[in-house]
Image (tube, helix red, strand yellow):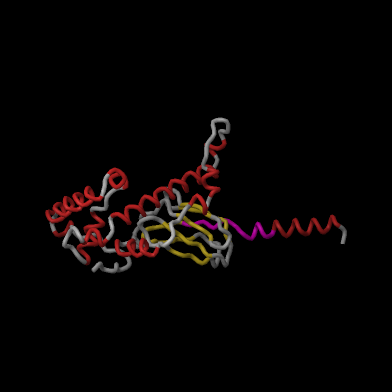
Amino acid sequence: MKPTYFILIIALFIVSAANAQDVLKGTVYEKNKSEKVPNVFVKDLTNKQITITDDNGNFGIHTATGHTLVLNCPGYVSDTLYVTDMRPKRIEMVSQTISLRQVNVTASKEAFDPHKEYPEVYTKSRVSVMSPSTWFSKEGKDARRLKRYFQHAEEESQIDEAFNVDYVKSVVPLRGAELENFMSLYRPSYAFLKNNNAPSMTAYINDAYKKYQALPANKKVLPKLGAAPTSLQ
């Protein structure tokens, strides 16, 4: 076989392999609701491609049949999609209960470092006054959105660690569903956490408990989720 033909065959094989991984499009909704979920992190475990949903919950990712996608978003239970075809997908994510948040915190033995896992995100997110394309390219915009997602996820994780079930239980007498509702209603912001210490957190919880006690009964209960939550004991 002549070298020219050999090179041509290899080129055709590479093109065929690239075409085999088309863009799968989908939209993420909150379970049993019409609300679309933005800023959902989508990762293909097979080819390591990543993306994030836009403000309308839409995403597109290079993948292929037989691949597995994992979807993550702070406040929601992680979901998995096995790609059986390339038709547009409707994915519903379940709101994450406080109890599930605490399980995730306990199970996290090693801190996730996106700088190590996805260095290309931070490289592509940079902008330069000498290169206008870094401001307006889709790749750059997506990278900056992913960077903001990683930052938000880290902030939520720190809140989970500080405002945890055992700590709140040591301050207020609530248990079970009441504790779940209280912690969901009065979850502190990252700004508060960053600017206050442990005694301030205790004072915050006590003050929040007084406000909770003053609420009418129907305001103390959160809307029911699609999946039944595990109660806190």
Is 136 drawn above or below residue 101 in the view shown?
Answer: above
Quadrant in which the N terminus is drawn: bottom right
Start-end of magenta stretch: 16-26
Q: What x and y, as percent, mark residue 153? A: 40, 52
> Residue visible at 20% across and 60% down?
170
Is 73 drawn above or below residue 140 in the view shown?
Answer: below
- In front: 199, or 217? 199
Q: What x and y, as percent, mark residue 80? A: 46, 65
- In front: 14, or 57? 14
Quadrant in which the C terminus is drawn: bottom left
Total numbered badges shown on the rendered structure: 0
Q: What x and y, as percent, mark residue 58? A: 46, 52
Answer with left or right where residue 163 lies relative to residue 206.
right
- Magenta stretch contains residue 112: no
Q: Residue furthest top?
A: 130
The quarter of the displayed image where residue 107 is located: bottom left
- Magenta stretch contains residue 17: yes
Q: What x and y, as percent, mark residue 109? A: 41, 62
